[in-house]
Amino acid sequence: MIIRKLFKFENAHIVRNCTSRRCSRSIHGHSYKVEVKLSSNYLDNGEMVYDFGLMKVTIKDLIDSFDHAITLWAKDDDEYIEYAKKFSERWIVLPVNPSAEQFSRVFFIMIDRVLNLMEFNNGEKEVKLHSIVVHETDTGYAECFREDAYNFKGMGEIKLEDIVFSDRIKEEWNDSRLWDKLLREEKLTPPKEI
Ligand SMILES: Nc1nc2c(c(=O)[nH]1)N=C([C@H](O)[C@H](O)COP(=O)(O)OP(=O)(O)OP(=O)(O)O)CN2
């Protein structure tokens, strides 16, 4: 069975080297919608694949990092990156161009790590990340499956170590050590009740 939870965020970016001129040469924003789809053949003590409420803790914090923020590509012009960081306290640097496709891969890799480290304390079993859908506009989306997320040869490698969040973003997380924990692969403990 697949369950799906929808998250939303507002974000600014430029996607370099694409054919659409407005997209590649002007800073612009989107009201993104992100669908996180989880799968399992089992149900927990509440007869759910995974409580939607639990998805509103760590997974939500990570996606919400991108809200009212600017997303920068590490290979963009240094001057542009420095100015964006100077004038926006909420910024993220990615090792890949911030297209809908790469956003969906970035979210897949981050949320996959969260699920791999999360303790399941309410009888959840074999909860897996099925796919991530990133709607950039009302009319266009990208959907990332496991084979896309880890398709380093065809689509570029995304290492969590190469994703950088500004201090202000990290300060707003429920757990300010969240990123360290993901990088060091420390166990994550869910709240007993939400
Ligand atoms: N495959 C992709 N194509 C485009 C992406 C992308 O991430 N993946 N991104 C863009 C731009 O960011 C652009 O802002 C969105 O383009 P578009 O869908 O053309 O946006 P519109 O709102 O103008 O769409 P309408 O359907 O005409 O309203 C470009 N391409």
Image: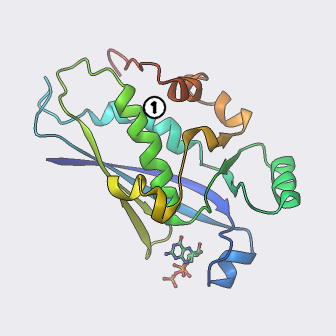
Q: Is residue 24 above or below residue 118?
A: below
What is the x, y in percent for residue 49?
A: 18, 36
Instruction: Look at 12% across and 32% down and name the residue there.
Output: 43
Quadrant the C terminus occupies: top left
Ligand 1, by image quadrant, is: bottom right
Instruction: Look at 67% across and 28% down and name the residue there.
Output: 171
Q: Is residue 169 above or below residue 94?
A: above
Mark 1, Cα crowd under 10 Å, few <14 / some 14-19 / many 20+, is many
How is the rendered protein coloured?
A: rainbow
Q: Is residue 138 left or right of residue 184?
A: left
Q: Is residue 122 left or right of residue 165?
A: left
For ligand 1, tell me if the residue under mark 1 lies within 8 Å: no
Q: Is residue 138 above or below residue 68?
A: below
Camera-side residue: 167 or 128? 128
Instruction: Look at 52% across and 60% down and name the residue there.
Output: 102
Secondary element under disc 1, as helix, strand or loop, is helix
How many marks the image carries: the answer is: 1
Q: Looking at this rendering, what residue extends furthest in the top direction?
A: 192
What is the x, y in percent for residue 192?
A: 32, 14
Camera-side residue: 32 or 62? 62
Q: Is any part of residue 190 visible from this angle?
A: yes
Instruction: Look at 62% across and 78% down and name the residue there.
Output: 18
Kind of residue at badge 1:
Thr
Camera-side residue: 7 or 96? 96
Q: Looking at this rendering, what residue extends furthest in the front direction?
A: 153
Residue pointed to by mark 1: 58
What is the x, y in percent for residue 60?
A: 46, 39
Q: Is residue 43 left or right of residue 12?
A: left
Q: Is residue 121 above or below residue 66?
A: above
Q: Is any part of residue 145 visible from this angle?
A: no
What is the x, y in percent for residue 98?
A: 60, 61
